[in-house]
């Protein structure tokens, strides 16, 4: 297990390590525990692990940050303008490099982030078995119209979603709208992660376009997408077409879900029958599966 997690670390750092070789010299234990790598101009690199930070002794220069960003963009910043404007670039293997710096606006829209001073590399991990409880819902014979997976950042929503696709993709036809190439991480049309034998991957499509094309062309049983942001009318179109939805959203508690206007509209639409909450505590991540009718009656957690 440590060996495979170490390899995931090395995969995520395959570009940055050319400019920061010290990242390759950490122990196998740190590589296995690593979740994020923070690279900031004028400060040392920090490897964020489960419950602790491993701080390197090197000082990162602004030119090193710039070199990393250019390399992430395959030496063509112009080709990645859309991604840079959104503050991230998806790396080979499904890892993601997020950026902070100076925003360039056109009206109310950010068109570019320049003078990038910080990079956060999030390591895509595979956790076989982490979606087994959720998969049981889909194999139980119960009517699962739709599933909403919620949790705070770094609670493992994308990892659970990917594993759920792998498990239930052997029974159901899934259309995976992989807008940022983080779930299947398709390269030249081939997913680098196992997302199920019956899963059709729509890479790089925005959610609205991907959902429309999936319904029209692929006759899925479920449409799967990471992070809520879809026009509710399209969710209703899924319902009217007999297609279920599986999606994630950033919310850490039931109270946060109740306060979220978009989530309330989604839940009241009838598209969701179950909510899976990923809750972080000092022992790790726990999964709470709630039927929608019970959700409105229970106290906040």
Image (spheres, grey):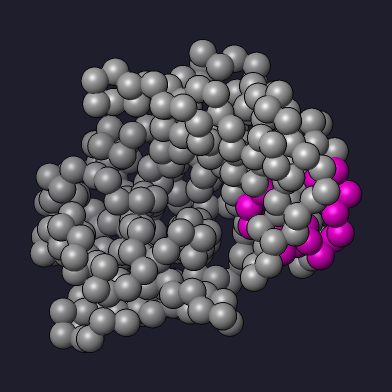
* Residue at figure coordinates x 40%, y 66% from the top left: 151
**Of the pair 278 and 210, the residue shown nearer to us:** 278
Q: In this view, does 270 lie above or below 276?
A: above
**Of the pair 31 and 64, the residue shown nearer to us:** 64
Residue 116 % position (x, y)? 56, 28
Residue 89 % position (x, y)? 53, 33
Q: Which residue extends farthest front?
A: 42
Magenta stretch: includes residue 67: no
Principal SS element in the magenta part? helix
Picture quadrant where residue 233 is located: top left
Q: In the image, is 134 to the left or to the right of 95?
A: left
Q: Is residue 220 above or below residue 65?
A: below
* Residue at figure coordinates x 30%, y 51% from the top left: 228
Q: In the image, is 76 to the left or to the right of 215?
A: right
* Residue at figure coordinates x 81%, y 31% from the top left: 18
What segment carries the magenta color? 22-37
Residue 128 % position (x, y)? 61, 67
Please say whether residue 82 is visible from this viewpoint.
Answer: no
- Which quarter of the figure is the C terminus placed in? bottom left
Please say whether residue 99 is visible from this viewpoint.
Answer: yes
- Which quarter of the figure is the N terminus placed in? bottom right
Magenta stretch: includes residue 23: yes
* Residue at figure coordinates x 16%, y 79% from the top left: 296
How many numbered marks have been drawn onto this rendered protein structure? 0
**Of the pair 101 and 176, the residue shown nearer to us:** 101
Residue 24 % position (x, y)? 84, 46
Q: In the image, is 172 to the left or to the right of 272?
A: right
């Amino acid at each position: 297990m440590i060996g495979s997690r170490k390899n995931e670390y090395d995969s995520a750092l395959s570009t940055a390590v050319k400019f920061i070789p010290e990242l390759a010299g950490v122990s196998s234990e740190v590589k296995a525990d690593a979740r994020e790598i923070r690279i900031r101009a004028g400060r040392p690199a920090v490897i964020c692990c489960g419950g602790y930070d491993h701080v390197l002794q090197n000082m990162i220069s602004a030119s090193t940050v710039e070199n990393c960003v250019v390399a992430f963009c395959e030496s063509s910043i112009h080709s990645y303008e859309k991604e840079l404007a959104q503050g991230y670039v998806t790396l080979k293997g499904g890892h993601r490099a997020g950026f902070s710096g100076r925003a360039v606006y056109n009206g109310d829209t950010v068109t570019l982030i320049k003078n990038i001073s910080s990079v956060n590399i999030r390591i895509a991990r595979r956790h076989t078995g982490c979606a087994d409880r959720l998969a049981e819902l889909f194999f139980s014979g119960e009517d699962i119209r739709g599933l909403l997976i919620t949790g705070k950042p770094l609670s493992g929503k994308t990892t659970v979603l990917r594993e759920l696709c792998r498990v239930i993709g052997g029974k159901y036809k899934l259309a995976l709208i992989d807008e940022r190439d983080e779930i299947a991480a398709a390269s030249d049309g081939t997913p680098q992660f196992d997302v199920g034998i019956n899963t059709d991957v729509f890479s790089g499509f925005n959610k609205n376009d991907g959902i429309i094309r999936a319904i029209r062309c692929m006759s899925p049983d479920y449409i799967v997408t990471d992070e809520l942001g879809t026009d509710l009318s399209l969710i209703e179109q899924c319902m009217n077409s007999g297609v279920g939805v599986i999606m994630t959203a950033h919310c850490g508690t039931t109270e946060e879900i109740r306060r979220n206007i978009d989530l309330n509209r989604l839940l009241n639409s009838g598209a969701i029958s179950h909510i899976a909450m990923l809750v972080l505590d000092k022992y790790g991540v726990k999964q709470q599966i709630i039927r929608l009718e019970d959700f409105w009656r229970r106290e906040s957690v």
